[in-house]
Image: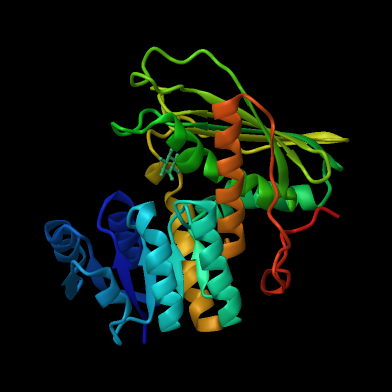
Amino acid sequence: MAVQVGVIGAGLMGSTHVRTLSASVPDAEVAAVSDAIRGSAERIAREAGVQTVSTDALELIHDPGIEAVVIASPASTHEQFVLACLEAGKPVLCEKPLAATPEAARHVLDAEVALGRRLVQVGFMRRFDPGYVDLRTRLHRREIGTPILVYSTHRNATVPAGFGTEMIIKDTVVHDVDTVRWLLGQELVKATALRTRSTSLAAPGVRDPQVVTFETEDGTLVNVEAFVNAQYGYDIRCEIVGESGALSLPRLEPVPMGFQERFASAYARELDAWVASIAGGDPAGASAWDGYAASTVCEAAWQAVSTGQTTDIALGKKPDLYTSNPLVAHS
Ligand code: ISE
């Protein structure tokens, strides 16, 4: 029988996940959708043939008919809902960020460690993008030797109204942070923000683009550019420069216009791997530690943007629960 999945949040991401689970993940069935706005949940439920509609996420989580949960509600709700899933012993795929603050992400991490088993996967879907997977495989085959520099470029054509400078870091750069940690198998230890001129097309007071340089544990330098009013398209680039060569993510032509188009395959593979991990028990994708690390790094990056000073990043010791599936250390 297909895994009975409940989806919390019927906005852009939640609806995308309902459609993808329904159309592309044969071992899953979306059995319930909840959203604070009943009409939103009803709309996607009608489209996808979902039986149960709710406006109460906790009711969905504790529904005995629901075996696993996807959280795609606002970041401010993630801590409460993920903790409820852990309490109910249900596997949960939580959209990034894991929580609204590093402290809240730490609460989730500590709760999963106390439980003693991994139930949390965080929605860093680039880990399932074929281009990024190939890049990482070739890097770990040492095709370019030891990495020295990484350039990660993250351009949106436009963003919704109200998308401020802090969101450029915590909602956009957060992907580049997780991707680079995963590619290199390294934690990030310092953040420095560069002052750039802003595009005249940014909303008043928004400083866009943002350029943040990170240093990894072994001294690799990572340059992240996030430009969310680029107009021409949703352009994701990554180049890794090593001691004996360079590797780049394939460039898509024409440039897609949005992240749903650019990462459609990654979202489907992410959900498929998550459902398979529920049946098979092996955790897939980014863990609660990765979610905590990404939130902590982005908070430090935001401090660097706000102060103009280089900010140190201290994650503390990684719990043993996450060392059995370590970041792929660059040998
Ligand atoms: C959005 O939430 C995403 O996750 C996209 O991948 C990112 O490009 C965009 O900037 C975010 O707002």
Q: Please give the name of the residue rendered at 82% of the width and 39% of the height, measured from the top-left corner.
A: 219
Judge from the rendering whether residue 149 lies leftward or rightward of residue 124; answer left or right.
Answer: right
What x and y, as percent, mark residue 229? 40, 24
Quadrant position of ligand 1 = top left
Q: Please give the name of the residue rendered at 56% of the width and 61% of the height, measured from the top-left corner.
A: 106
What x and y, as percent, mark residue 51? 18, 76
Q: In which quarter of the image is residue 301?
A: top right
Judge from the rendering whether residue 42 lies leftward or rightward of residue 71; answer left or right.
Answer: left
Q: In this view, does 276 lie above or below 253?
A: below
What x and y, as percent, mark residue 315? 68, 54
Q: How many labels does the image show?
A: 0
Q: Please give the name of the residue rendered at 31% of the width and 67% of the height, measured from the top-left corner.
A: 7
What x and y, as percent, mark residue 313? 69, 44
Nearer-the-camera pick, 300 or 137:
300
Judge from the rendering whether residue 319 lies leftward or rightward of residue 274; answer left or right.
Answer: right
Nearer-the-camera pick, 307 or 199:
307
Location of the C terminus by quadrant is bottom right
Q: In this view, does 94 lie above or below 225?
A: below
- The colour style of the image is rainbow
